[in-house]
């Protein structure tokens, strides 16, 4: 797994900083953020936000709070993820076209 560092909260101190990365092989966005407080968790857990989906937060998921001042950094991460995804598509196409099957 290779993480590409995108940015960190510009108003942060020396530790505990909301941060954004892109996992280069999958183009997934990775966020480090402030753990949601009980009130926010209860609000998120209290209703069905999308039709057909259960209310609540599954045990394998969590809620984090990302400061609004990270929006420009998140946009940068989205662009990086899109580029990584396009590179992966191009590489797969190159691999597919590189072998004709003819001997």
Image: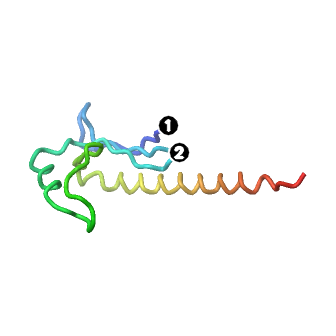
Instruction: Please tell me whether mark 2 sits on a helix, a strand or a loop.
Output: loop
Crowd class of label 2 (few under 14; some 14 to 19; many from 20; radius 10 Å): some
Q: Mark 1 sits on what residue?
A: 1
- Is the image coloured rainbow, by chain, by secondary structure, or in one colour? rainbow
Judged left or right of residue 94, residue 71 is left
| Residue projecting furthest to the top | 14
Q: Nearer the viewer, residue 83 or 27?
A: 27
47 lies above or below 27: below
Judged left or right of residue 35, residue 79 is right
Residue 102 has which mark? Answer: none
Q: Nearer the viewer, residue 14 or 79?
A: 79
| Residue projecting furthest to the bottom | 51
**Residue 51 image offset from top left, x and y in percent:** 26, 68
Q: Looking at the rendering, which quadrant does residue 43 occupy?
A: bottom left
Marks 2/1 in contact by CB < 8 Å: the verdict is yes
Going 28% across and 46% down the picture, which residue do you hit? 61
Nearer-N-terminus badge (2/1): 1
**Residue 70 image offset from top left, x and y in percent:** 29, 51
Going 71% across and 51% down the picture, which residue do you hit? 95
| Residue projecting furthest to the right | 103
| Residue projecting furthest to the left | 39
Crowd class of label 1 (few under 14; some 14 to 19; many from 20; radius 10 Å): few
Please give the count of numbered marks on the rendered protein.
Answer: 2
Going 32% across and 42% down the picture, which residue do you hit? 19
**Residue 21 image offset from top left, x and y in percent:** 40, 44
Instruction: Please tell me whether mark 1 sits on a helix, a strand or a loop.
Output: loop
Q: Mark 2 sits on what residue?
A: 25
**Residue 83 image offset from top left, x and y in percent:** 53, 55
Q: Spatial distance from mark 2 to mark 1, Cα to Cα?
A: 7 Å
């Amino acid at each position: 797994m290779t993480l590409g560092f995108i940015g960190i909260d510009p108003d942060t101190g020396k530790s505990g900083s909301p941060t954004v990365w892109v996992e280069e092989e999958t183009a997934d966005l990775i966020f480090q953020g402030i753990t949601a407080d009980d009130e926010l968790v209860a609000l998120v857990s209290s209703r069905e936000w999308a039709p057909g989906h259960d209310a609540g937060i599954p045990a394998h998921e969590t809620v984090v709070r990302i400061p609004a001042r990270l929006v420009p950094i998140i946009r940068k991460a989205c662009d990086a993820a899109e580029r990584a995804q396009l590179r992966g598509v191009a590489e797969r196409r190159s691999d597919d076209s590189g072998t004709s099957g003819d001997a």
